[in-house]
Image: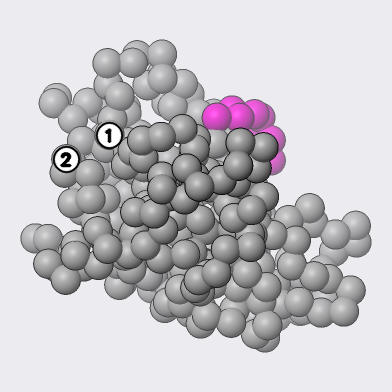
Amino acid sequence: MPVLSEEDRAFWEEQGYVVVREAVPLENCRAAERAVWEFLEMDPNDPESWYPDPPRRGIMVEIYQHQALWDNRQSLRVHQAFSEIWGTEKLWVSFDRASMNPPERPDWKFPGPYLHWDMSLEMPVRLKVQGVLYLTDTPAEQGAFTCIPGFHRKLEGWLKTLPPETDPRKLVRELPGATPIGGKAGDLVIWHSALPHGSRPNSAQRPRMAQYITMSPAREDNEEARQRRITGWRERLTGLGQEKQEKEHFHGRTAELTPLGRKLLGLDRWDG
């Protein structure tokens, strides 16, 4: 059954993002949130623990292979949403991380990421998508995901107007129209990577807790890539192409996969 309505699809084409409501059950969000707190060795009920000394380098949390994160990745509704955007069910899921963005206070200010792109700016624009899953209710002022809606349709023309010596990755932070996209726990924001996007300062009382998830067409003809993914899962290595042995490798447990999860990893092939 489709996840995206006709209105959702039209909004996606026009604005470059869409919010999938209740993409995962609330209990999944709670489990992933607990996993992030435990990984950080922080107490969700003790605000002083949110600001360690020395301070964290940013808001990202280098947790990749926990069972709770995999449970969200192998959600049927999450997969269906990405399938409708890509036009195929044959996808691989990213080994992406989480984030914890605490409220600003006098001795801790938001370090970014501000508006940026996670893609090449060589034209033409190609379809690439990203996603963030809210693990807790996240109103706009709570450091919500932020983007410039509709800019995926303007990017190529905008780049052509820039002088040759201009760095668009620096200039993007000055563009108008940055809009925070709030949501409830379990909501998944999917966006076109051509949208300038980032997080924002948290002026609320609680941290923003989120998990990044995206999917792209499976590259089952690339056996080396498939085996590296399987090793990354089995050995609990860091994601995003780093493949390092860090905390989860030494202290974690390899996640159990559903039949869908096995295909999203590459352990099983989509065509059997």
- Residue 117 belongs to the span the image colors magenta: no
Instruction: Say what amino acid the circle numbered 2 marks.
Output: Thr
Instruction: Say what amino acid the circle numbered 1 marks.
Output: Pro
Q: Nearer the viewer, residue 19 or 27?
A: 19
User: Against 85, is 26 above or below?
Assistant: below
- Residue 204 is drawn in which quadrant? bottom right
Q: Secondary structure at mark 2?
A: loop
Relative placement, left or right, of 156 versus 55 is left
Q: Residue at 55% across / 30% down in the picture?
A: 241
Q: Can residue 7 be spotted in the picture?
A: yes
Query: Distance between the Cα atoms at labels 2 and 1?
Result: 8 Å
Q: Residue at 54% across / 36% down in the picture?
A: 240
Relative placement, left or right, of 52 versus 242 is right
Circle 2/circle 1 CB separation < 8 Å: yes
Instruction: State which region is magenta.
Output: 241-249
Disc number placed over residue 88 in the picture, else none: 2
Q: Quadrant of the N terminus?
A: bottom left
Q: Which tag, 2 or 1, sits closer to the chain's start?
A: 2
User: How far across and down, in percent of the image, does residue 105 sit?
Assistant: 81, 79
User: How far across and down, in percent of the image, does residue 208 sit?
Assistant: 59, 72
Q: Residue at 57% across / 63% down in the picture?
A: 175
Q: Which residue is mark 1?
A: 217
Q: Quadrant of the C terminus?
A: top left
User: How far across and down, in percent of the image, does residue 233 sit?
Assistant: 47, 33
Disc number placed over residue 70 in the picture, else none: none
Q: Nearer the viewer, residue 30 or 170?
A: 170
